[in-house]
Amino acid sequence: MALNLQTFKTRTLSAIIFAVIMLAGLLLNYWSFFLLFSVVHFGCWFEYHKLMERIHPAYKQISSFHRYIVPLIGFALMLFSAGETLAIGTFSLHSLGWWLLLLLVLMLPLGELLFAKQTSLKCYGISLLGLVYISMSWSMLVLLRDQFTVQFPGFETLDYGKWVVCILVFSIWINDTMAYIVGSLIGKTPFSPISPKKTWEGTIGGAVLAIVVITTVAYFIGLNYMECGIIAAIAAVFGTLGDLLESKLKRMAGIKDSGNILPGHGGFLDRFDSLLIATPVVWLYFFLFQ
């Protein structure tokens, strides 16, 4: 297939802009991180609504109140998950999240009574699934950023939470890149009918190389390389499952991309599908073993 130079330029420029925004959000400070994933949270919800409307057309009939209040409940959960160090004056985001969550949960049934034209348990279930799939995942990422840490000998003043999230994100990036390269070079065995372009060779190669790269880098800069390797392994395995899940949803909806926020790369769900599933597993690992 001949290379389309204009398409290549568009994809490359989009990838550079995406990487710069992500790195700035991840590395600057806690506020930049929270702002970045607040935007991602609402972007994922916007695309999730569009997907579900195509999969289950009755979901188009939910009230505007329902459409906006449920993502706001998810955002309140993210605020509640934030640490006390994030504050506006003397009022922390954690406290703000608690009161906003309480208010919105109380408002939801009242708003449904007043504004809903019809009630559907399936539509409510779809919204609940969105809270679990999107909002709970980003809330757990906020918890990882603030509460759970990898013990890094010799880095007593290191912002541990920031690097836990960075290791997770970088592991997914490396896994995706290496899986594509290995699959393109030697991939022959289809991995799943959900995503025909994925191969077992590429999937295994991407996972192995992600673990090797993360573990090696961690070792040479003095981090706990075993812990970092575990994060990379979780990211590779469950990140791949996250990608397959979103591919399944898109296939059910009959679309190629969940959105077009990044020309040539798709939407928010396309970019963060792996992280949405890997994050809860990494959080669970730290919850159980830290």
Image (tube, grey):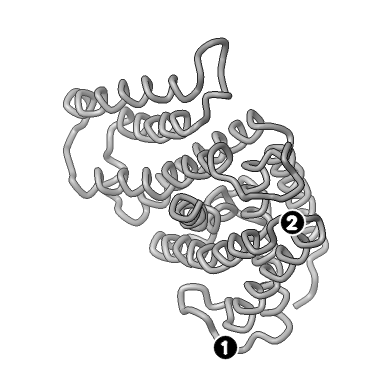
> Where residue 189 is drawn, which disc sits there?
1
Nearest to the observer: residue 64 or residue 42: 42
Earlier in the chain: of badge 1 and badge 2, it is 2
Nearest to the observer: residue 234 or residue 276: 234
Q: Amino acid at mark 2?
A: Arg
Q: Quadrant of residue 101?
A: top left
Q: Quadrant of residue 160?
A: top right
Q: Residue at x 40, y 59 (%)?
A: 253
Residue at the disc numbered 2: 11
Q: Is residue 205 above or below residue 175?
A: below
Secondary structure under the numbered disc 1 in the rendered image: loop
Measured as percent of width and height from the top left, residue 86 is found at 57, 24
Measured as percent of width and height from the top left, residue 66 is found at 30, 32
Q: Amino acid at mark 1?
A: Thr
Q: Residue at x 43, y 29 (%)?
A: 80
> Where residue 74 is drawn, which disc sits there?
none
Do the residues bearing badges 1 and 2 touch, measured as CB atoms within 8 Å? no
Q: Residue at x 46, y 34 (%)?
A: 81
Q: Residues within 10 Å of mark 2 (few under 14, many from 20)?
A: some
Nearest to the observer: residue 199 or residue 4: 199
Nearest to the observer: residue 5 or residue 98: 98
Q: Which corner quadrant holds the N terminus?
A: bottom right
**With 120 as the anchor, is 24 left or right in this view?**
right
